[in-house]
Amino acid sequence: MNPGASRAGPRFSRTPGAIQRPPAPPGEQTDEVLGDWGFSAEAMAELRADGAIA
């Protein structure tokens, strides 16, 4: 017998079952994320002009 097979699984009865807030709209965090990845403002502007990002 598997030693862990008799353990009960996690219980989530105290975890909120409702969505706390709506998701961020597409593109809202694009500049922040691309900046974190090392993209310059000029590179982001070029991507935006090419239609690659919103």
Image (cartoon, helix red, strand yellow):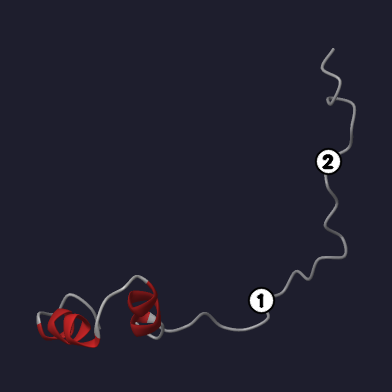
The secondary element bearing badge 1 is classed as loop
Q: Is residue 11 above or below residue 41?
A: above
Foreground residue among 8 and 3: 3
- Residue located 86% across and 51% down the image: 11
Q: Position of residue 21 (x, y in %)?
A: 62, 84
Amino acid at the residue labelled 1: Ile
Amino acid at the residue labelled 2: Gly
Crowd around label 1: few <14 · some 14–19 · many ≥20 (10 Å): few
Foreground residue among 48 and 38: 38
Q: Are marks 1 and 2 in contact (CB under 8 Å)?
A: no
Which of the 4 image quarters holds residue 34?
bottom left
Extreme residue toward the top, this view: 1
Number of numbered discs on residues: 2
Q: Position of residue 36 (x, y in %)?
A: 39, 75
Q: In the picture, which quadrant includes the C terminus?
A: bottom left
Which of the 4 image quarters holds residue 4?
top right
**Circle 2 is placed at which residue position?**
9
Of pointers 1 and 2, the one earlier in the residue sequence? 2
Left or right: where 49 falls relative to 29: left
Crowd around label 2: few <14 · some 14–19 · many ≥20 (10 Å): few
Identify the mark at residue 28; answer none if there is no mark: none
From where the camera sits, is residue 10 visible?
A: yes
Marks 1 and 2 sit apart, C-alpha to C-alpha, by: 23 Å
Q: Is residue 39 above or below residue 12?
A: below
- Residue located 16% across and 79% down the image: 47
**Circle 1 is placed at which residue position?**
19
- Residue located 66% across and 76% down the image: 19
Q: Is residue 7 above or below residue 53?
A: above
